[in-house]
Image (tube, helix red, strand yellow):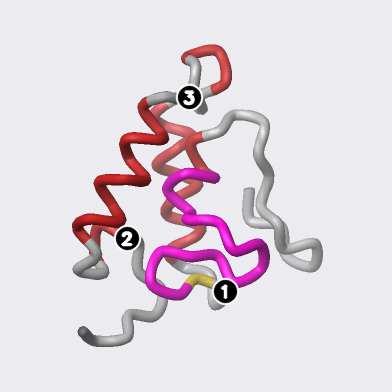
Amino acid sequence: MRECRRCLLREAAEEDTYKSVMEKVEKIPARDRAPEEVYRTRLAACAACDHLLAGVCMKCGCYVEFRAAHSRMKCPDAAGKRW
């Protein structure tokens, strides 16, 4: 498997992990889930971040697809908050 910098799980050839994370995203109650447009904007910001490594934020250790889906979550990079 190639090391994939600055890519999301769906792009990193991690199909099983991506499916597992997306199943958890689907279980987030609707009231706690970010709107689709906000989610996509967050993912785009994460994809452009130097702290992303194969779908994982190296600042907090979260899978970015999961963290971005929560409406109350924030970017963990205190120095350069992206969202």
Name the amino acid type tagged 1.
His
Choose between 15 and 38: the one closer to the eye. 15
The residue singled out by tag 2 in the image is: 9
Left or right: residue 54 versus residue 32 is left
Q: Based on the picture, tell me whether residue 63 belongs to the magenta stretch.
A: yes
Kindly identify the residue that appears in the image at 50 percent across and 47 percent down.
Answer: 42
Q: Are marks 2 and 3 in contact (CB under 8 Å)?
A: no
Label ID, residue 51: 1
Quarter occupied by residue 53: bottom left
The crowding category of the residue bearing disc 2, from other C-alpha atoms within 10 Å (few below 14, some 14 to 19, many at least 20), is many
For label 2, the SS is helix
Circle nearer the viewer, 2 or 1: 2
Residue extending farthest top: 31
Q: Residue at coordinates 79% horizontally, 67% vertically from top-left?
A: 79
Q: Are marks 2 and 1 in contact (CB under 8 Å)?
A: no
Question: Of the numbered discs in the image, which one, if any, rests on residue 34?
Answer: none
The residue lying at 45 percent from left, 37 percent from top is 39
Q: Is residue 24 above or below residue 3?
A: above
Amino acid type at image mark 2: Leu
Magenta segment includes 46 = no
Q: Which residues fall within the magenta stretch?
A: 53-67
* Marking on residue 28: 3
- Real-space Cα distance between discs 2 and 1? 14 Å
| Residue at left offset 49%, top offset 16% | 29
Q: Quarter holding the N terminus?
A: bottom left
